[in-house]
Image (spheres, grey):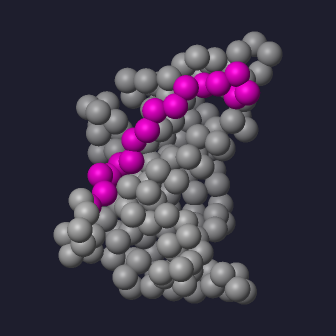
């Protein structure tokens, strides 16, 4: 695996970051609005790519593809509130020929309560035409190292 990440440490999977629920995230009774979770999901995805040394511009510049979202599904389990510290856990659960399933679990600060669980299907497309294409081999090799199970990801979050 070190050969895939020359000169750097391979990514830690899952990617875990902590984020507070902010004033702009809540409704009048201080419960996190459903649409605020999109921000947490987006930051989680960005942190995962960053941990794998795959910033968004590198997908296009180095691999000639873009990975837009085809589907986003969010299950809301329990409310979070203004001031809560959230643990956002991001990982891939599947890498296919043309796409991946990206998972984002949004939990309380010590990762014992699940607030929301999202999965996104992202597909490889050619940037100029948005025509679906295969994930290039070198990129695919890097992506498979970001795959883990829901159970393993949540256990890692609890121990972080």
Q: Nearer the viewer, residue 93 or 17?
A: 17
> Does 110 appear in magenta?
no
Residue 7 in sight from this viewpoint: yes
Looking at the image, how many numbered discs can be counted on the residues? Answer: 0
Q: Position of residue 4 (x, y in %)?
A: 27, 74
Q: Position of residue 132 (x, y in %)?
A: 63, 83
Image quadrant in which the N terminus is located:
bottom left
Residue 38 relative to residue 116: left or right: right
> Residue 67: which quarter of the image?
bottom right
Point out the residue furthest to the right here. Answer: 28
**Which residues fall within the magenta stretch?**
10-25
Q: At which x and y percent is residue 43?
A: 56, 46
- Name the residue located 62 percent from the left edge and 80 percent from the top edge: 125
- Vertical order, 53 against 77 (above or below): below
Q: Is residue 150 above or below residue 143?
A: above
Q: Residue at 52%, 53% (x, y): give it.
A: 45
Q: What residue is drawn where x is 66% and y is 44%?
A: 38
State which quadrant residue 141 falls in.
bottom left
Return the x and y of residue 69 as percentages of the image width and height: 64, 64
Asked whether 140 or 116 is in front, the reply is 140
Q: Horizontal placement of 71 versus 117: left or right?
A: right
Does 17 lie within the magenta span? yes
């Amino acid at each position: 695996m070190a050969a895939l990440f020359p000169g750097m440490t391979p990514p830690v999977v899952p990617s875990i970051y902590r984020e507070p629920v902010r004033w702009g995230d809540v409704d009048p009774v201080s419960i996190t609005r459903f649409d605020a979770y999109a921000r947490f999901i987006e930051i989680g995805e960005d942190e995962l790519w960053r941990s794998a040394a795959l910033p968004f511009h590198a997908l296009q510049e180095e691999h000639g593809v873009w990975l837009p979202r085809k589907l986003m599904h969010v299950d809301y389990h329990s409310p979070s509130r203004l001031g809560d510290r959230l643990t956002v856990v991001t990982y891939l659960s599947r890498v296919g020929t043309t796409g991946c399933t990206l998972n984002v679990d949004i939990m309380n600060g010590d990762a014992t309560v699940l607030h929301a669980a999202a999965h996104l299907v992202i597909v490889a497309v050619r940037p100029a035409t948005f025509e679906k294409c295969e994930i290039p081999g070198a990129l695919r090799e890097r992506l498979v190292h970001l795959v883990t199970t829901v159970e393993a990801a949540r256990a890692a979050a609890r121990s972080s």
